[in-house]
Image: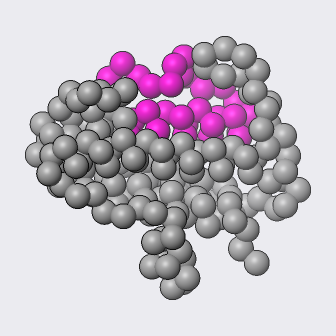
Amino acid sequence: MTLPIEMLVHYKAWANQRVFATVAALPEDEATKPRQTHFGSMVHTLNHVHVIDRIFQAHLEGRSHPYSSRNMPTHPPLQELWDSVTALDRWYIDYAASLDEQQIAQDVHFHYVDGGEGMMTRGEIILHLVNHATYHRGFVGDMLNQTGVVPRATDLTVFIRDVWKQR
């Protein structure tokens, strides 16, 4: 039986690919254009998701990370960000596949970048990352709509129907 977290990390990678492909098809100034949104642009919003994914990767590996906030002052070029996201998505897919039920339920203790102690199971961390990315893809979808581009569906149900059940 495939564990649900394996499906979730595959879903996240699939949704990332769809969103990045749509953003990459825009004129560069649209992808980085300042907008009325928390992280200021599509690329900077996608960078925030990646920073959080990196932070929690370090937590899962029991090591420190270089981040002191939930985003960086600037973001890399979109292609560089995509290359890094792709590699990290692959890491999470491999990581999830390596876990057994006992490891999924194992507590991970960490420090939040804005202060305070945290503790979540490995499975809860992965669920958080999938939900977090979905939440911020919604912001990017709204910004895409502002450019006149209808975002491609990235719903879990679409992934299950079109990809997961077709394997």
Residue with the most extreme right position: 102
Whether residue 158 is visible: yes
Residue 165 in the image: above or below residue 82 = below
The colour scheme used to paint the residues is one colour
Who's the residue at 21% across and 27% down the image? Answer: 34
Total tally of numbered discs in the picture: 0
Who's the residue at 66% across and 49% down the image? Answer: 126
Q: In screen coordinates, is 44 left or right of 99?
A: left
Residue 113 found in image quarter: top right
- Image quadrant holding the C terminus, namely bottom right
Residue 146 found in image quarter: top left
- Image quadrant holding the N terminus, namely bottom right
Who's the residue at 65% across and 50% down the image? Answer: 127
Residue with the most extreme top position: 115
Q: Position of residue 108 (x, y in %)?
A: 79, 37
In this rendered view, identify the residue nearer to me: 49 or 84: 49
Q: Is residue 69 magenta?
A: yes
Who's the residue at 71% across and 22% down the image? Answer: 111
Q: In screen coordinates, is 25 left or right of 65?
A: left
Give the magenta part as a residue range: 46-75
Residue 33 in the image: above or below residue 3 = above
Q: In screen coordinates, is 107 left or right of 31?
A: right
Q: Position of residue 7 (x, y in %)?
A: 61, 67
Q: Position of residue 38 (x, y in %)?
A: 37, 26
Whether residue 84 is visible: no
Q: In screen coordinates, is 67 left or right of 64?
A: left
